Amino acid sequence: MAHRRERNQPVRQDQLQLQLWGLRPPAPTHRSRQREGAAVRYAVAGALALLASPATAEPLARITVTDGGIPHVRAATSYGMGYGSGYATALTDACGAAEAFLTYGGRRSSVLGADGETALHIPVPSSVPNSLNDFNIAFSIGPAELARARKGLSADLRQVIDGYVAGYNRRLAEAPPASCRDSAVAITVDDVLRRSLAYGMTLGTRFFLRQLHAAAPPGPGEVAAAEPALAPQPLPSVGSNGLAFGREVTAGGGLLLANPHYVWRGPERFIQMHLSGPGYDVIGAMMLGSPLVSIGANPSLGWTYTVAAGAKGLLYRLSLDPKDPTRYLVDGVSKPMQRQIVTIDARGADGKAGRLSHAFWTSEFGPIVEGPGLPWSRREAFALFDPNVANAGSLQLSLDSGRARSVRELQALLAGMGLPFLNAIAADAGGEVLYANNSPTPAIGSNSFGVCLVTGIPANAYPLTVVIDGAKSVCRPQAVAEAAWPGILPAKAMPAMVRRDYVANSNDSHWLANP
C-alpha cells in the first residue's frame, strides 16, 4: 500500500445516483447493470432529515462507492462523518462487523449461546467457548474501564462514535444480512469502546485468555506435580512491514510503503475507506468495528504500523504465604489476593436466557494466570501485568493522527501512548520520515532489573513477556514522571527518530530502523 496523495484529489464518480431518504432504492436500469465500475452515491440522512423532503434537507453524509467496493464518505460534521462510516461499514461487511461487536462486546453467549465457539484469528488462530470469551471481556473491560474510556473522549470524537453507532444500526435495520441475521444486532457506544479496548489487549490479556480463566487456588492438601519442561509457546501470527523514504532519496516529498500482515477474514480483517469531515480527510485501512481509519494517508501525511519488539507484559512470580495460597509475600509481608465474581448473560442449549458466573483472582500486579508452565501451587502463582489495560487512547489517536500535517505533529501525538504494542512509520509532504516505538512498555528500574528478572523456569517459554520476581517491592512497575499513566515508560524513554533519508521496520528491534 503506497501512499502519496495530492491535495483534493478527486474521487471518480458516475451518473448513477441513489438518494436514501428512508425509502427503498429504485431498481437499477438495464443500462446501469451493464456499466462496468459504476459508482453509487448514497446520500444518507438521519432520523430528523427523513421527515423533510430530499429537495430541502441536507443529508448527514454522502457515500460514494467506487471500483472494488471502496466507500468514500463526505460529511460537514463529525457526527455525519461517523454516521457515514458506520453505514458504510455495514454496507461493506455487516457480518464481519457483527462478529467483531459480539466478540469484543462480550455478547456471544447471550446472542448465540454459551456453548458455541468463538473463532480467535489473532494473536494465535484458535477457538474458545463463547462463555470463556465473554467472561474475559466482562472481567477486563468492566464499568470502571468503560467510564475511563468515555472520560478520555474529546467532544469531537464522541460525535464521531455516536454517529457511527446510529449509521451502523440504520443500515442493519434497513437491510438485515441474510447470512448472519442472528448475530447482526444493534450496537451501542460501549460496544465500540470495548472493541477498541480489547484490541489494545491483544498481546496481553487476550493472549492469556485461557490461563486467566483457568486460575483457581489449590485445594487443601493438594500437592502440585513437578512442572515438566515447556516448549516455546506459539508466537502471535501478526506483523507488518513499513518503509518510509524522505526527500534525500526521493524526487521530492515523502513516500510510504505500508505492507500489513493481517488476517483476511473474520472480524479482524481490514476494510478500505475514505473519510472526509471537519479537518479530517483520510483514506486507508480500518478495522471492522472501528469508526476511523487505522493506517492510511491524508493530503500531507502517510502512516502505518508494525508490531513492536520487546515485552508486551510481565509475568510476576508470586511467592505464596505457606498458610494460605490466596495470599502472597512482598518483602516478607503477607498480602491477600482479591476474588472477583463476573456474571454474564447467556443462552443455554435449550434457547432459554440465563446467567453464568465465574471467579477471577487478582493481585496488586494484575490477575492470576494458570496453565502449562504457570502453576498455582501452595508455593507459587503467577500474575499478569498488561500495560495496555489502562490504555484508552487509541480511538482519540486515530482521529488526531488523521488531522496531523507532519511527522513531527504525529510524533507529539504518539507521546500520549495511545498506540498499543505497535511501532509507527510515517512520511510527510515535506520529505521527513518517522520511526517511533511509543507502545506502552512496563517500567522496571534499570538498576533493579537484574535482581528482578527470573530465568530458568517453564514460564520463560511464553513469548512477548518477561518473568519478574513479585516478592520484591523494588520490582513493581514504577510510576515514572511524565509517563502517560503509572507503570509504563514515558515517551522520552522510548526509541524514535525523524530523518530525511529512510526508516524501515519489519517487527524487529528499534536499532534496525536505520542502522
Image (cartoon, rainbow, N blue to C red):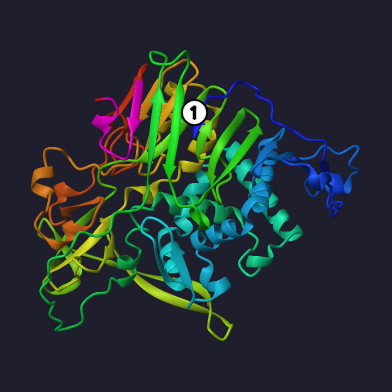
As drawn, is 423 to the left or to the right of 195?
Answer: left
The image shows residue 453 at horizontal and vertical percentages of 12, 49
Q: Tell whether 307 sits left or right of 69.
A: left
Q: Where 331 falls versus 439 (above or below)?
A: below
Residue identifier under label 1? 302
| Rendered location of residue 360, percent (x, y) | 34, 69
Q: At which x and y percent is residue 346? A: 52, 76
Q: Which residues are magenta?
A: 502-514
In the image, taking residue 428 as reference, residue 374 lies left or right, namely: left
Q: Is residue 170 above or below residue 178?
A: above
The foreground one among 90 and 166 is 90
Tell me the quadrant of the picture where the C terminus can be found.
Answer: top left
Residue drawn 82% across and 44% down? 32
For image coordinates 46% across by 60% down, the residue present is: 142
Front one among 434 and 258 = 258
Residue 508 forms part of the magenta stretch: yes
| Residue in the picture at 51% in, 28% down | 3
Q: Examine the structure image and report whether residue 465 is included in the region drawn in magenta.
A: no
* Residue 123 percent location from the top left of the image: 37, 55
Residue at the (20%, 66%) spot, across then down: 374
Viewer-proximal residue among 369 and 301? 301
Amino acid on which the number 1 mark rests in the picture: Gly
Question: Which element is circle 1 on?
Answer: strand
Closer to the camera, 18 or 357?
18
Is residue 268 something one can see in this rendering? Answer: yes
Residue 48 visible in this rendered orientation of the protein: no
Position of 210 relative to 393 (above/below): below
